[in-house]
Image (cartoon, rainbow, N blue to C red):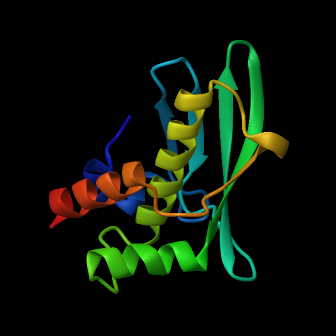
Amino acid sequence: MATLMEMERETPAKAPASMGLMLESATPNGYRLRYRSGAGICGTGETIYQFEVLHSLSSVTCGVRLPAYVKELVRAETGREHLPAGGRFWEAMCEEALSNYLFRNDRLPDDDTLRVVDLTPDLLRWVNAVIEALS
């Protein structure tokens, strides 16, 4: 899987802008996540990112809901209004949250939807590592 830093170096010409890049990652316990970059859906007070989760022989669409207040928590914790990689930063953070959930629980979230309700220590470590790597 390409890292966030490698994604920053990708040229947009590799895929039509309307399609976005198809990204894939895997958890140590066998879940694979697929996501089309740029496919977040903005709603009232939150953005929803849809991931295809593959495990064994099944494939399920799983949503990750990222409330605006969690984005504000990240900005406050980092002291940055603008984060590296723009919208891709939030996509990757949701991917990390879903990956952590699948690894720790070894099951899909209830109703195939994960809501990021707080900036957990794991996510904060990830945020700080990404910002340091891209700064």
Residue 109 lies in quadrant: top right
Foreground: 128 or 18? Answer: 128
Residue, far top: 56
The residue at 34%/67% (across/down) is: 85
- Indicate the position of residue 90 as horizontal and vertical percent values: 48, 64
Query: Relative to 3, does residue 93 appear above or below in the rendering?
Result: below
Residue 120 lies in quadrant: bottom left
- Indicate the position of residue 8 as horizontal and vertical percent values: 29, 59
Residue, far right: 111
Quadrant into which the N terminus falls: top left
The residue at 49%/42% (across/down) is: 23
In this image, 118 relative to 59: left or right? left
Query: Relative to 101, does residue 47 appear above or below in the rendering?
Result: below
In this image, 6 relative to 49: left or right? left
- Indicate the position of residue 93 as horizontal and vertical percent values: 46, 56
Foreground: 58 or 46? Answer: 46
- Indicate the position of residue 111 as horizontal and vertical percent values: 84, 44
Query: Relative to 56, does residue 43 appear above or below in the rendering?
Result: below
Quadrant into which the C terminus falls: bottom left
In this image, 9 relative to 67: left or right? left
Query: Relative to 43, does residue 120 appear above or below in the rendering?
Result: above
- How many discs mark residues in the rendered view? 0
The residue at 49%/53% (across/down) is: 15
Residue, far bottom: 81
